[in-house]
Image (tube, grey):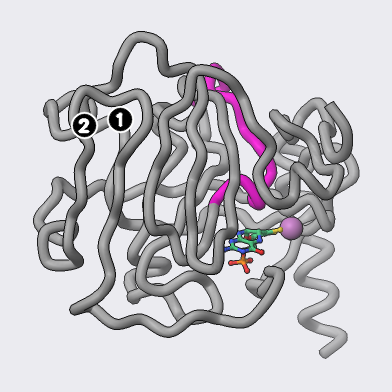
Amino acid sequence: MFDSIFRRKETEQKVQKEGRLPPGQSLTQKFPVLHYGPVPGFNPAKWDFHVRGEVEQEVRWSWEEFNQLPRTKLVMDIHCVTRWSKFDTEWEGVSVRTLVEQGLIKIKPAAKYVMQHAEYGFTANLPLEVLLGDNFLMATHFDGQPLSPDHGYPLRGVIGRILERDELVVPYFWKGAKWLRGLEFMTADRPGFWEQAGYHMNADVWKEERFGY
Ligand SMILES: Nc1nc2c(c(=O)[nH]1)N[C@H]1C(S)=C(S)[C@@H](COP(=O)(O)O)O[C@H]1N2
Ligand SMILES: [Mo]
């Protein structure tokens, strides 16, 4: 117990020295679960992924089709607005940027923002260029295993910091919707679920954009 508290502090000082600990954050070695409402079930026969809004062609992928999309692995530091940060987290899933590059999603030029749509009507908004960054992934796996139900199984958005890629904007972790079911490309920004509750539209971790606009 005391040993693990000591080790946590030591690791925190290390990432702080390396410039990886954003203002007002502290390191956790656990993986806290945070969301509003119950954990949804998953029925692969009924599940689909819907791409709509400012796209040349609306898309609907079944779970089987979704699993045939090109896959990406990613290591990131993630930062929750409730002040915990987790370092070197490993994710695997589908990159929206790759889907666009391969012509699997054709975005119209008018698209500037994206809404993630999840089970039970949960939403999270992001600027298009942030969602198309290498640090946003639609993840099916964490740490080499399928997501657990309370972390978003079978699919969730994740966003964080990739080391040495400081040109990428790093929003707080709530900007990744668990139980993700679709993307809506939009011409104008709209607040998602937590944003309607007062959280920040852009939520840049390094600028501490926690609340408000
Ligand atoms: N569907 C859904 N996704 C969600 C939320 C939610 O309430 N519902 N909460 C967000 C918040 S506030 C956080 S901090 C992260 C937490 O992810 P975790 O439970 O895997 O740590 O999920 C985000 N995604
Ligand atoms: Mo959160």
Relative side of 39 to 172, left or right: left
Return the residue nearer the eye: 188 or 130: 188
Q: Quadrant of the C terminus?
A: top right
Write down the residue under mark 2: 105
Kindly state the secondary structure of the residue where label 2 is placed: loop
* Start-end of magenta stretch: 165-176
Picture layout, residue 168 above or below residue 34: above
Three-letter amino acid code at the position of disc 2:
Ile
Residue drawn at 64 percent across, 31 percent down = 190
Write down the residue under mark 1: 97
Please provide percent x and percent y for residue 53. 37, 31
Please provide percent x and percent y for residue 64. 12, 67
Dots 2 and 1: beta carbons under 8 Å? Answer: no
Q: Quadrant of residue 103?
A: top left
Residue drawn at 62 percent across, 50 percent down = 78
Report crowding for label 2: few under 14, some 14 to 19, many 20 or more residues within 10 A (C-alpha).
Answer: some
Please provide percent x and percent y for residue 146. 34, 75
Three-letter amino acid code at the position of disc 1:
Arg
**Which secondary structure type mostly characterizes the magenta part of the structure?**
loop
